[in-house]
Amino acid sequence: TIYRSLVVRQLVSPLRDLGFQVSGSVKLKKYGSLEDYKFFDYQLGIMNGSGMNQWDNNSSKDIVFRGVFYPWKGIHIGGSGRFGKQKPYSSAAGDGERITFGGEVKLEYFNFLLQGEYIYGYRKNLPGQEASGCGGAATPPIIDELESSGYYFTLLYKTPWNLEPVVKYEVYNPADKINLEVDNTLPTESVSTITLGLNYFLNDWSRLQVNYMINDDPNESHTLITDRNDAYFKQQFVVQFQAILQ
């Protein structure tokens, strides 16, 4: 879809960061009737935690990790997490904290793809953020402690004509558990979006996307979704450039 899911935009930000990453995989010489089967992938990163193209703004680093198991062909089950200390909203209250954990599943069969993810986030004493890309809304400061969570499921089908219909349902709960010096602009009600889309692949590196989104955001004082409670079209053309050095 054109936009990342709201739970991703709210809890996994910054989506880009400066840091160092190692990754790899584990292969099994014999796995049932399969040989040299990739059973597990992993990535581990140490990041500034301050966002894209930004120097670190405190003395701590963020630890980011992800692992995916492949118990059988077409089945992916994984988990991920991030934890670190951040520049605080109030230095008198100590360091800011951000912890995120997620679980994911992906099922591939024939030309169908079903994928979903659940994400939980804990945040404490953090400054507000400006609106992010891919449809993200600005967030107010978190003065004390806040727990949030959400999930999404996406179903796609790749046709023989380079067309890919897509359906996505997502839910974000901005305040599962709240312990704040109450900021009355903080969103507390669950929001959801249904996205109906169609992707057309011109070739391996370019595609046209059209999405129709149906939003439900009952938060009055601080909305999480642009054009909340409206249904509207969004379209984009994507060209991908890739250089491979050998």
Image: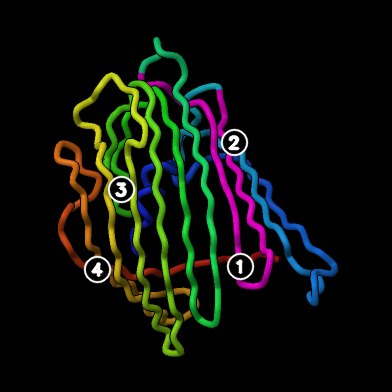
Secondary structure under the numbered disc 2 in the rendered image: strand
Q: Going from the N terminus, do you reach mark 1 or mark 2 first?
A: 2
Q: Which mark is residue 212?
A: 4
* Amino acid marked by disc 2: Ile
- Amino acid type assigned to the residue bearing label 1 in the image: Ile
Judge from the rendering whether residue 185 lies leftward or rightward of residue 74; answer left or right: left
- Mark 3 vs mark 4: give the one in front: 4
Q: Mark 2 and mark 1 in contact (Cβ < 8 Å)?
A: no
In the image, what residue occupies the spot 53% across and 55% down? 104
* Residue at the disc numbered 3: 136
- CA gap between label 3 and label 1 equals 30 Å
- The residue wearing badge 1 is 75
Residue 155 location, x and y as percent?
A: 42, 70
If you read the primary sequence from the N terminus, does the residue marked by circle 2 or circle 3 appear first? 2
The part of the chain drawn in magenta is: 60-89
Between disc 1 and disc 4, the foreground one is 1
